[in-house]
Amino acid sequence: MDLTSIFITGIVFGTIYGIIYLLIRKKERMALIEKGLDANIFMTEKISKKRNNLKYGLLSTGVGLGILLGNIFVNANLLEEEVAYFSMIFLFGGISLLIDFFLERKMK
């Protein structure tokens, strides 16, 4: 199977999911506003989004470092290609999530 068809299928389903998610979210917010409830719950979402941005940024950096170090190990003939890439990606991805955990705990 061609990778292009997989990406196109993923993009189509992702777009449909995103549109439906946004429509449902808008209806929920409008219902809360109509009932006169406090809008503070919307502010807590912004704070959690900032923390998620930190988490995803650290995870992306860790995965990038894992790919880079895996490539270095392959070129130096220290590890086989599959082992080098997968182990380094998971190792640095996990380390970055641990760093995020300790940073969030420190912020609280």
Image: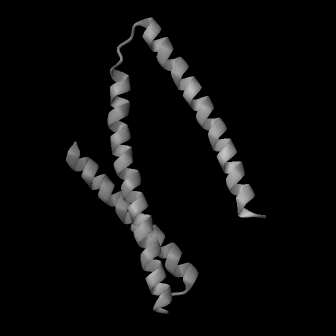
Q: Residue at x 32, y 35 (%)?
A: 47
Q: Residue at x 55, y 29 (%)?
A: 22
Classify 31 as above or below 81: above
x and y percentages locating residue 39 in the rendered image:
36, 17
x and y percentages locating residue 61 in the rendered image:
39, 63
x and y percentages locating residue 50 in the rendered image:
34, 41
Q: In the picture, which quadrant includes the C terminus?
A: top left
x and y percentages locating residue 32 in the rendered image:
45, 13
Task: State the residue in front, 16 or 101.
Answer: 16
Q: In the picture, which quadrant includes the N terminus?
A: bottom right
Classify 66 as above or below 81: above
Classify 48 as above or below 22: below
Q: Quadrant of residue 96?
A: bottom left
Q: Residue furthest bottom?
A: 77
Q: Residue at x 33, y 21 (%)?
A: 40
Q: Residue at x 34, y 30 (%)?
A: 44
Q: Quadrant of residue 82?
A: bottom right
